[in-house]
Amino acid sequence: MKSYKDYPRQSVSMSKDDVFQSTLKQIFTENQIDYVIETGTWLGTGSTQTLARAFSPGRLPKAYYTIEGNLTFHTIARFNLLKWPFVKPLWGDTVAKEKALHFIKHDEALLHHEQYADVFIDTLEDPVRFYTNEVEGKLGKNWVISMVDWFGETFLSRQDDLLQNLLIKHRDDRPLVLLDSAGGIGWLEYQTVRDTLGNRPYWLILDDIHHLKHFRSFNDVRTRADFRVIGHSLADGWMIAEHLA
C-alpha cells in the first residue's frame, strides 16, 4: 500500500465534490428517504452538513443518525448541527470495541499490506498498532480531549454496536447508510451493513474507496448483481449505490 500522506488530493472531501452533491440532490428529489445512518460525524461540518443541506424542505428525513466515537468531536458536532433538528448525533462505537480490535489484528489486508500496491493507508509503520490506537481513542490526544474522555468514562454511558442496532431498527425503512468509517474498520462496517440488511433495499455511500478503509467494500459493491452503482469518483474517493431488493 501507499502512504496517504503522499496522496496529492488527500485534503479533498467528498462533501466538496460538485458531482457528489448534485447526485445526492437528484436522489433526494426523486425518492423519499426517511432515515439516514452515518458513521463518522467528526465535527459535523463535512458530509453531515452536505447531506442535510441536500434534502429539499418538503422532503426532510424523520431522523438522520450520525455516530462519533470521540466525545469532544461529538460535543462540538452537536452545536454545529443545531440548524438541522432532524440530525441526531450519537456518541459511541459503531461496532463493539472488542470486535473491532479482533478484526484489525487479523485483517489480511493489514497484515500483508505490501500486496496491495494501488491502495492508500494512513501509515506504513506498524499499521495494526496505528489502527488499534485509533479504535481505542489514543490518536490525536491533547489535554482537552483527555479531560472530556475522563468525564465521559466517569459519568456517561458509552454505547456500542450502534451501527447494527440502527440497521436492525430501520432495516424495513429503506435507509441511506453513509460509511465514513474509522480507517481500520471500514470493511468490517460494510460487512455489517450488507449482512444485517440482507436482501432489503437501501442506499449506500462509501467514503475513501481508494483507501484501506473501503477499497474492498467498493470492489464488492461493483461486482454484485444486487447493487447498482449510481456514481463514484476514485480521485475524490466516494461512491453512491443502491441496493436492490
Image (cartoon, rainbow, N blue to C red):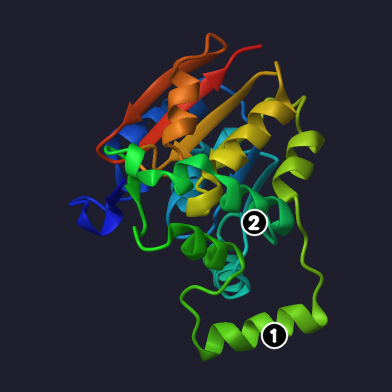
Mark 1 — residue?
Answer: 150
Residue 8 horizontal side relative to residue 169, left or right: left
Q: Position of residue 193 (x, y in %)?
A: 65, 33
Per the image, label 2 sits on a secondary structure element best described as helix
- Report crowding for label 1: few under 14, some 14 to 19, many 20 or more residues within 10 A (C-alpha): few
Residue 46 horizontal side relative to residue 174, left or right: left
Q: Looking at the rendered structure, which numbered label has been put on residue 211?
A: none
Q: Nearer the viewer, residue 82 or 95?
A: 95
Q: Do residues under tags 1 and 2 come within 8 Å of each other at their CB atoms?
A: no
- Residue 227, above or below 186: above
Which amino acid is tagged 2? Leu
**Sequence order check: which comes first, mark 1 or mark 2?**
2
- Residue 39, above or below 200: below
Q: Position of residue 198 (x, y in %)?
A: 71, 21
Q: Residue 171: which quarter of the image?
A: top right
Q: Quadrant of the N terminus?
A: top left
Mark 2 — residue?
Answer: 101
**Residue found at x 51% / y 36%:** 56
Which amino acid is tagged 1? Trp
**Residue found at x 62% / y 33%:** 191
